[in-house]
Image: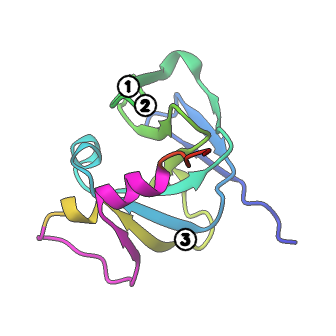
Amino acid sequence: MSTPLSCHGQCLCGAVQLDCRPDSTEVSACHCQTCRRWGGGPLLVAECALPPIIGGGDALAIHASSDWAERGFCRHCGTHLFYRLKTKPYYAIPVGLLGDGPDWTLTSEVFIDAKPAWYCFSNQTRQLTGAQLFAEQAPSDPT
């Protein structure tokens, strides 16, 4: 059995600290317009089922970026801290926050249909369109 990952990060000004347990060393890239506007490029994240432990409560701000998700950031320096779903336990932590951390590997890209043509990654990745991602994340029909 492998040792669970444990990562620590902080915002640019140090007002907010974050401890998380990524599900793996795999990195996902999101090319949706919201992520690109939020950070000026694709969002590269480590995915976590468990919520991160966050210190610096007064500095933490939350923005409801859609009907289904929220984004956390430092209200002092603006550092992006996480993206989380409102409906299930899922947190996406920008890997740049986590220092050198483990040996990350880019393995998947979502909203590939929204990716601008002017950049691309050299890794071979699993690529999903926005519609494919939503279909994959939809609750299963209990009937």
* Residue at figure coordinates x 45%, y 63% from the top left: 28
Q: Are marks 1 and 2 in contact (CB under 8 Å)?
A: yes
Image height of 52 relative to 109, above or below? above
Q: From which residue to which does the magenta span run? A: 117-137
> For residue 118, which quarter of the picture?
bottom left
Q: Which residue is mark 1?
A: 64
Instruction: Identify the mark nearer the N-term, 1 or 2.
Output: 1
Q: Which residue is mark 2?
A: 70
**Gap between marks 3 and 1 measured at Cα:** 28 Å
The quadrant in which the N terminus is found is bottom right
Which mark, by number, is residue 14?
none
Q: Which residue is mark 3?
A: 104
Tell which of 63 and 12 is nearer to you: 63
Picture coordinates of residue 105, whole percent (x, y): 51, 75
Instruction: Identify the mark nearer the N-term, 3 or 1.
Output: 1
> For residue 142, which quarter of the picture?
top right
Counting the numbered discs, the total is 3
**Secondary structure under badge 1?**
strand
Judged left or right of residue 59, residue 35 is: left
Tell which of 74 and 133 is nearer to you: 133
